[in-house]
Every structure is written in structure tokens, then in C-alpha cells.
Amino acid sequence: MTALDLTPAADAAPVTSLLRFATAGSVDDGKSTLVGRLLHDTKSILADAYEAVERVTRERGGEGVDLALLTDGLRAEREQGITIDVAYRYFSTPRRTFILADCPGHVQYTRNTVTGASTADALVVLIDARHGVVEQTRRHLAVAALLRVPHVIVAVNKIDLLAWERAPYEAITADVATLAAGLGLEVTTVPVSALLGDNVATRSQNTPWYDGPTVLDLLETLPSGDEIAAALDADGARAVASGATPASAWRLPVQYVLRPQDAAIAPEYREYRGYAGQVAEGVVRVGDEVRVQPSGRRSTIAGIDTADGPLESARAGQSIAVRLADDVDVARGDLLSSVADAALPTKHLDAHVAWLAERPLRVRDRVLVQHGSALVQGLVSGITGVLDIALPGGTLDASIVPGGELGLNDIGVVSIVLAQPLAVEDYGTHRRTGAFVLVDPQDGGTLAAGTARAAEPGTGTDGYLSV
Amino acid sequence: MTSTTERTDVSPTSTTAAGLAAPAGPTTLDALEAEGIHILREAVATARKPVILFSGGKDSVVVLHLATKAFWPGRVPVELLHVDTGHNFDEVIEFRNATVARLGLRLQVASVQSYIDDGRLRERPDGTRNPLQTVPLLDAIAGHGYDVVFGGARRDEEKARAKERVVSLRDEFGQWDPRNQRPELWSLYNTRHLPGQHVRVFPLSNWTELDVWRYIEREGIELPSLYYAHEREVFERDGMLLTPHPSVKLRDGEATAPRIVRYRTVGDASCTGAVESGAASVADVIAEVAATRITERGATRADDRLSEAAMEDRKKEGYF
Ligand SMILES: Nc1nc2c(ncn2[C@@H]2O[C@H](COP(=O)(O)OP(=O)(O)OP(=O)(O)O)[C@@H](O)[C@H]2O)c(=O)[nH]1
């Protein structure tokens, strides 16, 4: 047993950016081992946790430290030796802080991959080098495509068992590239041994034929959603400074109307009225024109406030409150947006739906649609098809087969008629305002993840479809 | 915060946290704060009667701080609830009361002591009262009709917590069913529940202990003095440094001695141990935490040591 190096990896410097990523793989591909390896090699495992795992490994008749045990949380899993639910892990390097959604691999837990991928800037998919691309790989890549995860890292694992040979890795890489092209995914493959650590956090001496990045290199350098938003903000600020109009598409779902009145923290705020929310997309600036959805009313941003003081602009991810220049009616559930490209509110939702509940979804089922902070009633008006996860067509659209109902873990194409219009947008171009969940109107359970598809032509210019 | 203690830096940047030039991009703390505010606003907006569990411990203090920012320029529109074990450190209770008064909030106290006094609960043989908090907590939730209950738990604290959702559904018994959790997608939080059920909401889910301390430094958040190094009469039991307290009587062979210590968590005085530390300021604590070798709960909570699955068992039972 070599001594564990316990030098803290994360120094106390607070100025790091945040990357959210998820992991997925089929049973025994070595996902838990890879995650344990990442935590171990970034020195994110504290001594008592490490010792506990060492002890359990010994109790089970193993040797050394089974890194997979570091991430196996719940008792049921320990009993069955499998991962059954998304577990969130936190680690950091001097460059970045990471939030890792560790998603279990079994078919019946695909809903967890959907959960983990929905917030991910990147998805790490494990492939056992001995088996190559299997059905679960296709399923995970399909989920990544459906949820538009910006980057996919395919870790081709256990290459030590193939004597570090290049040919099998190259063959898998080619298969993955074909799949990725069909799905419109940006994918990087890396040959790794999670067990031994090769190309996970440190470059392998055993793969001289590979000169690409390690898994950790990629995680440290891929642009995060927050960084992309910041770059956009900086571009806009430069444009404003130079007198040009910044490209200003932005979205702000209204979560809460701040109207303190008697509860104001100081008398000058008694009449304050601000619309609070987290910027969903783009950069909003003081002076921007505003469209209020779904009413369509217009106004101008008079001010952007935070408890720390006013701002000139706010970008995707920031939680703020805005004041409007006019006394227009705005409530929780409304979407404030830039004017030029504002979405048309619609009462007809056409979407991909990942069904996550035990009971099936059928035509004429009643659901609640949660979109941003809006919650409206919906009626399933059609189920036009179900995705064949083997992706026989090579693309999502070409792999939809006719089907009349959705079962647990199915992904289908569904139409929903809404009781009130919602400003739902195409998920392909608007990851936040194109996303929604379906909720059970009776017990309140979360039933499905939905990604809206561009409105069909002929929906009508006002966005209201007569049904 | 006064800091005169000499120490060696774990990294050249550890003392300059507040003084660094603002980075171009958003920092981890910016992202975590924005997420926490979003969660608080969302859950409060959908609640009939929300409540923040407030013990005066650092995580609950940070939740409350986020709430003051989320609802600025109004007062926090949420009541506070403290499940008082009767074994609290005096400093913590004073701090709690001062905070409540400063923010003009309403505090409800559910007292474990009164349950013991009238026989509804019995003292455990080991004297630990953390496990006894469950019943008064659930009674308070039902009695006051709270439907959204904010807590300061973090997923990095312990393995079972790593799988808990930001919004966690609880049944009439406060139970958490790890096999039947709602999927949590994007930042679309589902707080719906049936009558009798409630949801626990954890705005700090994605924070680490280090994030919490860095945020305390950045925001200048005040904490009970116990969190910083001070001289205290302590004795050793089961590898922990305990303070004599009406609930923690010295046994044969145990003797106190003055040591320079601080607390990493400030719960039940009978089972919360101090650690030897010279960290007298937030910056010192950050340096210490960054270099630390033992997870927070492992270091100081005797009741978590009962079994590896102790936390999971208590969560199923409705504990925080
Ligand atoms: N030789 C070799 N074995 C590996 C490697 N990675 C993982 N393994 C082994 O493969 C087995 C499965 O690994 P796990 O990490 O538990 O697999 P998993 O994908 O997390 O599986 P579930 O937890 O069941 O979803 C274990 O015995 C590991 O030690 C590797 O790179 N090389």
C-alpha cells in the first residue's frame, strides 16, 4: 500500500470557474472506478473517507482500495453492489471546481442519465474497450443529443486488458465518430484505464500512440456555460462602449415579484416593485426593450438590482431583479425577453419527451407542464412515435418508429395542447426556454423531461393553434 | 474578525481571497450564490407556509444570508424554526436570538427538552440528543402547517446526502425514500406535494465546506464565536474533545485541560467535539479547511460514527 498523498489539491484561491458534468456507462464498464480515480488523482478524497473505503475493501476480501466504493452511496447499493441513483460529487483543481452527476448505468435507470445530463456542460460516457459500442452507449449518446449536452467525452476504458493496443481503440473511435456525426454531437474519445489511472488525470506511458488530452485536461479546458455567457457579456459591453448596439437576445423567467411594502428593509423601498429571476439566456442591459410573454406587452428595463447594488447588465446564470419603466402587468410565470427575437407564445407544444415514470403515457392523458416558473395544464393530443434507441436511422429523427404510448425510459415525439399559452422555444437553440417537465396533476410527481421542437409552420402568426 | 495568529500559508493566494481583482468570468461562488437564490425564490413562491431551519450553525446562517439577498429589498418572507436539543452552547443561542432580532424575523422553537420533561421522548443511554430531534421537528412542521422546509445540508457532507435532491419530498412521517426520488431536471424544481406531505429544500446542495467558508469571508457573514479558535477547558472522550456541560458530565479518569480549539459544527454539545486549531479568523479557517485531512462530520459528530449507514437511517426517519 503506497501512502496516500494528502497535499490539498485545491489551494485556497477562490477564483475558479465551475463546470458541471455527468458520467454514464453500462454496468461494469468501470464508471464508479473512473469517478473514484478522478477524485483520487485530484486529491479530493479526505483521509477518513479513504480509510473507510480501505476498511470495506478489506472486509469484502479485496486488496488495496476499491476506488469504485468511494462513490457507492446508499445502503441498497452496497448490498447489491450497484449504483442506483444519481450521486453528486464535488472536486476541484487549481483551475476549476467541478460538480459531477454520477449516473448509474442500468437500462432501467436511464432516467438518471437524463437527470444528470440536463444540467451538464459535458457528459463522460464510458465504453468497455473489450465490448465497444453497445446499446447503452447509443442510449447515452441519444440522451446527450436530445438534451444538447455541449460536449461529450467518450472514455474507452480497460485498455490495459487489451494490452494497450491501438487498433481496437481506433475501431471504437470510428464507430463513435459515425454515431456522433448522425446525432450532431461534439465528441472526443480518450483511451483510458480507470483502474490504473492511465489518461484519466495523468498521461499514460502505455499509449505512446495517443497524443490527445487526458479526461481531466478536457474537463479543465472545455468552456463552461457560465464562461460562454461571460464572453457574450464582454462582447456586448465592448459593443456598447463603441457605440454599436450589442446583439441582445436574452430571456428572464419571472420567479417572484418583489413588492415589499410594509416589509421593506428601509422606508425608501416601500414602493419598490421588481421582477426577480435568474437570467436564462443572453445578456440583459439597462435600457433594453422588453417583451412580456405571454401577454405581449412591451416596456423598457429601467434598472437591474441585486442586494449588492445595481448592475448595468446581467448575463445568463445571474439571479437578479429588474425594474420596468412602465406600469405593465407582470406576474410569476411570465417570461421577459428581448423584443426582436421574442418567442411566440403557443398553446400547442410539439416536443421530444423522455418518459421517466412507471406508469405509461397515453394519448388524452392530463398533465401539468412546468416551463420556467410557469405551470399550466396540458392534454396529450398525440404520440407520433418512439425513438428506437438502437438508432437504426443514424439520427434521432430517422430513428423514430410509430408508437402509441410511452413506457418508462422511452423517448417519444409528443404533442400537448395547453390550457394557457406558454412562450416555449425550440430547445435546439434555447436550452433553457425550450425545456419543460411534465408533472402528475394528481400526486405532483415528476413524469417526464421535455425538449420542445421548433413550432410547425402553419401554427399561425399569433402562435395560437386552434384545436 | 481579529486575526493576530501567526501561521504558514498553504498557498500564496490563501490570504488574498477578498483582495483579488475581480475575475473576468463568474467565479464558483457567484454561480453557487445565484443558484441558491434561484432555489429560495422558487420554493418560497410555490409554498403555502415556508420555514427555514435555523440553528445558528454556519450552513443555516448562510441559507438565511442567501434569503436576505433573494428577497431584498424586503424582509425575508419566511419564518425560522430551531429544533433546540437543550444541549446547545450558550454562545450559539445568543447568536441565534441576535440574528433573528436584527432581521426582524419570527422564530419558532421546538424544544427537545420539553418532550423529555413530559415523557414524550426518553433520554438515550448515550445522552446524545441529535437523534431525538426528529419527533419535535415533524410535530412542529405539522403543527405550524409548514409545507416547504429549508435546510442547510450539503451533498458533500456524507455519502447518503450525495444522492439527495435539492427538493426532497417527505411523507407524513418525514421519511425520505432514496429509491423513489423525483428526477430533478434542469433548474426546474418541483415542489408539489399532497396534503400531509412536505418538501425539504436544500439551497446549499452543491456547496462544499470550503465554498461555504469562502462565501462567509466574501460576504463578511458573522458566525457564533465558537467557530474560531479560543481557549477552552476540554477533555478527551472517544478521540473527541468535549466541553463539560450539564449534559456532558466527566466520567472517572477524565479530566479537563485548557486547549486552543474551535468547532467545525455547532450542534448538540454532548456529541459535538472541538478540534485543536489556531484558526482565529475566517481566512485562517479557509486555510485550515483547504489543508484538512478529515471530512467535517467524521471529525466531530459522534452520532455519525455509530455506523457507516447512520446518516442514511436517520434521514429515512425524517432527520434533517
Ligand atoms: N482491468 C481493468 N478493470 C477495470 C477498469 N476499470 C474498472 N475495472 C473493473 O471493472 C469492474 C466494474 O467497475 P465499476 O467501476 O464498479 O463499474 P460501474 O460501471 O461503475 O458499474 P455499476 O456500478 O454496476 O454501474 C470492477 O471490478 C473494476 O475494478 C480498468 O480500467 N481496467
Image: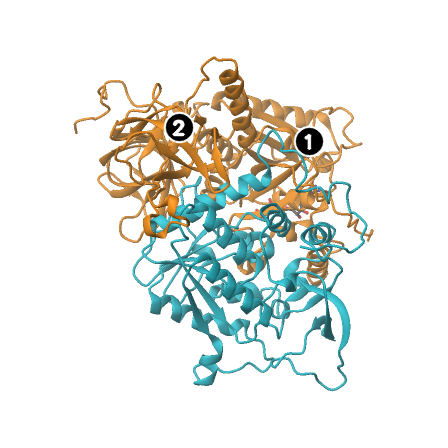
Q: Please give the name of the residue rendered at 68% of the width and 39% of the height, measured from the top-left corner.
A: B19
Q: Is residue A204 visible?
A: yes
Helix, strand or loop at label 2? It is: loop
Say if disc 2 is inside 8 Å of ligand 1.
no
- Would you name the residue on which mark 2 appears? A427
Q: Mark 1 Cα within 10 Å, few/some/many (few <14, many 20+)?
A: some
Q: Amino acid at mark 1?
A: Asp
Given contact means CB atoms under 8 Å apart, are the residues at marks 2 and 1 in contact? no
Residue B308 image position (x, y, % from top left): 62, 64
Between B131 and A35, the residue placed more toward the observer is: B131
Give the Cα separation between the discs numbered 2 and 1: 29 Å
Could you say which quadrant of the image residue A340 lies in? top left
Q: Quadrant of ligand 1?
A: top right
Q: Is residue B184 visible?
A: no
The shade of chain B is cyan
The shade of chain A is orange
Helix, strand or loop at label 1? It is: helix
